[in-house]
Image (cartoon, helix red, strand yellow):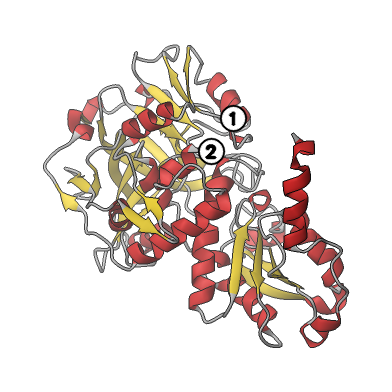
Amino acid sequence: MTKAGDSIEHHVPYEDLRQWIEQADRLGELRRVSDATWEEDIGLATELLQHDEKAPTALFDKIPGMDPGYRVLVNFFGGTRMNMTLGFPTHLSKFELSRAFMEVYRERVANPLPHQVVTGGPVTENVLTGDQVDLLKFPTPLWHEADGGRYIGTGSFNVTRDPDSGWINAGTYRVMVHDKNSVGFYISPGKHGRVHRDVYMARNEPMPVCVVIGGDPLLFLMTSTEIPQGVCEFDVAGAVRGKPMQVVRGQFTGLPFPANAEIVLEGFVQPGNVRPEGPFGEWTGYYGSDIRDEPVLDVKAIYHRNDPIILGCPPQRPPEEQSRYRAVMRSALLWDQVSNAGVPDVQAVWTHECGGSRMFTAISIKQRYAGHAKQAGLIASQCRVGAYAGKFVVVVDEDIDVTNLDDVMWAVSTRCDPASSIDIVRNTWSTPLDPSVTPAQRDAGDFTNSRAIIDACRPFAWRHEFPRVNMPTPEVARKAWEKFSYLLK
């Protein structure tokens, strides 16, 4: 057990998805559901659960038409279990959790623990090859009614290898079932897995891939995070947990994958082998990319535990589960990157859930010099964590609670002059999932957008003359709470 920040204990109390389920059950936040169909029921229930940050996690069992014991878990990041998932006390607020995570992550990402190769583990309890390969045996839900197929990969990650350096990357990309032995997967341009794939395809070489379905939640979150290029997510997750992650190597690709994963698909993407993929309801809240040809993974082997569990994390219209975990983690990483870029006196950062925790960011600073606010906004919009698919960065003074959207928009409404306080940066990194990318841009393969940098701080040159805020001082507010808080109960 280690300390984080101001003596906050940090300890990850689980090593795989099943131990995580036990911990969630102890917190009283697990619900077991029987006889829900993969065709409709699981998707309907997931939509309902993910939009309520206090809703429980749900484990679906006895799924009609499926073998007994084949299960689906959804809505893992919510309630107090989100603190448990990251290894922190359950009483921390989401902002305190983000801050505590930043302290641990900053130290551990600089000192990754190399993963350890072992000869076997729970995931090798069942190894299916040749004619035994059958993806249709798993209860993959139809997550959204307008989806173009069943997506087995939502709470999953793809393991790839850089063909030159040997760097192992693990990244989260959607994975659609085509038939019993093939899947398609979409990767947005610029992502590490896409960079690897483009190199293989340019060389006309088959690309080895492993898709991990039902990894432990901490590892899934690391693969959903902007880990520095050249660093393996397995090694960062091991460092955060405090012990090296154990992996086994696939018998066809040699790629490593967690020894305690629930399900792993192993195979190759052959150059030129594409099939229609999509549409899929995405994290923006839209079907941002329609049906299009995407590479196909021919599955050579399936590894799975007895009574395997699919970890489902399908995106919905935000705010929802993905925006919740992104807000906690990306806010911490963005704060760290902006500060490391030399911006002084950053007080807080929050990547707001309403924008999918990518498209609307608030950052507070203690102004030190003219141009400080613009510097903070520009760097926040273009550093690694903030660059992909952003739209708005609002910079506010230190008296504004960046996690409170009403507070942030009050600052925009009262401290921002639209003609002089908003800067537009054009041709920035976006994604085909961005619904505001025009049809003409799509036809040209131009997946860029613009960024609005909004200075909602008191104007630096006359900040001391800015009207006084109509709010009590902290001392008076505390006195009001002590005397009259009973009126709110």
* x, y percent for residue 11: 34, 47
**Disc 1 on helix, strand or loop?**
helix
Q: Which element type, helix, strand or loop, lies under badge 2?
A: loop
The residue indicated by pointer 1 is: 49
- Separation of marks 1 and 2 at Cα, in angstroms: 9 Å
Question: Residue drawn at (63%, 62%), measured in percent from left and top?
Answer: 390
Mark 1 surroundings within 10 Å by alpha-carbon count, few (fewer than 14), some (14 through 19), many (20 or more):
many
Q: Earlier in the sequence, mark 1 or mark 2?
A: 1
Residue shown at 14%/38% (left/top)? 120
Asked whether 310 or 345 is in front, the reply is: 345
User: Which percent across, then down, holds residue 365?
Assistant: 65, 73
Amino acid on which the number 2 mark rests in the picture: Gly
Label 2: few (<14), some or many (≥20) within 10 Å?
many
* Residue behind mark 2: 78
Q: Are marks 1 and 2 in contact (CB under 8 Å)?
A: yes
| Residue 189 in view (yes/no) | no
What's the mark number on residue 381?
none
Q: Nearer the viewer, residue 327 or 74?
A: 327
**Quarter of the image with the C terminus in it:** top right
Residue 126 drawn at (x, y percent):
20, 27
From where the camera sits, is residue 382 visible?
yes
- Mark 1 is on which residue type? Leu
Point 68% across, 80% down: residue: 367
Q: Is residue 105 above or below residue 244?
A: below
Q: Is residue 392 left or right of residue 315?
A: right
Pick out the residue farthest to the left: 119
Mark 1 or mark 2: which is in front?
Answer: 2
